[in-house]
Amino acid sequence: MNRHIDNVAAVEWRMMARGRATLKITPHEIGEALQLTLAQIPHSSGQETAQREIAAALEQVLNARRQRITVSRSQVNLIKWAALVVQAICTLIAIAFVHSDNRLASILSLSIFSTGVAVSVLLIATHDRPFAGVAAIGPGPFLQILPEEAVSQKEVDHSIILDLTTLLRSARQVISDQQELINEQRAGKELTGEMVIAKAQPIYAADSGHPLPALDPTSLEGRLLQAELDAISGVMNQAQPLINDPARGFKGFVPAIFTYRVAALFTRKAGDLAYLKLTAPAGLVRNPANAPDQWEQSVITGRFAAPEWNKRDFFAEEAMLNGRRAYRLLIPEYYETSCLSCHGEPKGERDISGGRKEGAKLGDLGGAISAAIYLK
């Protein structure tokens, strides 16, 4: 549809101005859109209704084009102009006869009527060809569809990103809640990917206000959510030998490690469509793979670190990512009580994982979840 709009504004509009636009050829883009629409196999009654509505809308597009071209080729022909002139002359003669005994009244009547005729001729002439001349209709309103579409796409991407990050944080909460179980020195714990996902779903529903969306394989949201669920399952299945190691106490499978691995696996699965990453301020990064890129670091230092920043807010905008335009979102993460055993005080002391504590306090900025969807 974008290509069709661009073609109409750049090419077809000039042809209509010259009266050369033709109805013999159906626009290739509309034919392609109609073929794509009818080729889809609906999986629900709602999709069947949507398919019918899209096909009907495309037919309306073709009807609107036919009307535009028909209007562009219509004009006031010579017979109409001749009839108008003859009618004006006859009326002027009749006025002159009626007021022949009063020269002043005759002059005024003829002047007034002549002015009306001149204005009518000018009005008809300027609107004779609606797509040409000083009063021509331009493609401006037609092109307004494009920014509206872009805004709509951004709103959709924003909704999908919130779903992805909320699911990731919900699953991380499950791992945090299960730390005692993970570190028990026994096997057979059955803390599988399926169990984590099942426990994460009510947390997701409580945080987002709605249940996990249906996984429609034909939608971008469905594909990305499925990729994230597969990543959660993949990380948990890979961690089973570690989680069920009876000879080891502290396993090191902490929420941050889980989140990093899920985000990395998700990005590998959906790298051409979207991106997830666990990051932190440059001075707090323990894993070099989590180091913030230039955009993430600028948001962290320029916005999240500001005293007036509302800790419940996140930041989103269109920005470059890996050389491509993307809709990017960054959610700040603040230290909670459970985080301080590894990241609190005293600063520099070794924590249970072997890393050095950062000396953080409750509520300090400790990291961020970065997400993006590449724009078309």
Image (cartoon, rainbow, N blue to C red):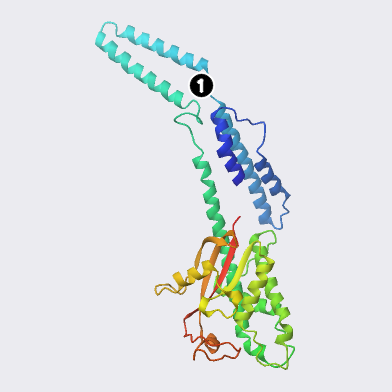
Circle count: 1
- The kind of residue tagged 1 is Val
SS under mark 1: loop
Looking at the picture, how far across and down is residue 127, in whole percent?
Answer: 47, 27
Res. 117 visible in picture: yes
Q: Residues within 10 Å of mark 1 (few under 14, many from 20)?
A: few
Image quadrant occupied by the C terminus: bottom right
Residue at 68% x, 56% y is 45
Which residue is tagged 1? Answer: 76
Looking at the picture, how far across and down is residue 371, in whole percent?
Answer: 58, 67
Res. 189 visible in picture: no
Residue at 51% x, 45% y is 144
Residue 372 or 206: which is nearer the viewer? 372
Looking at the picture, how far across and down is residue 235, in whole percent?
Answer: 69, 77
Residue at 58% x, 29% y is 70
Judge from the rendering whether residue 306 lies leftward or rightward of residue 271; answer left or right.
left
Q: Looking at the rendering, which quadrant does residue 124 occupy?
A: top left
Judge from the rendering whether residue 366 lies leftward or rightward of residue 238; answer left or right.
left
Please determine whether, in this image, residue 24 is positioned above or below residue 278. above
Residue 97 or 2: which is nearer the viewer? 2
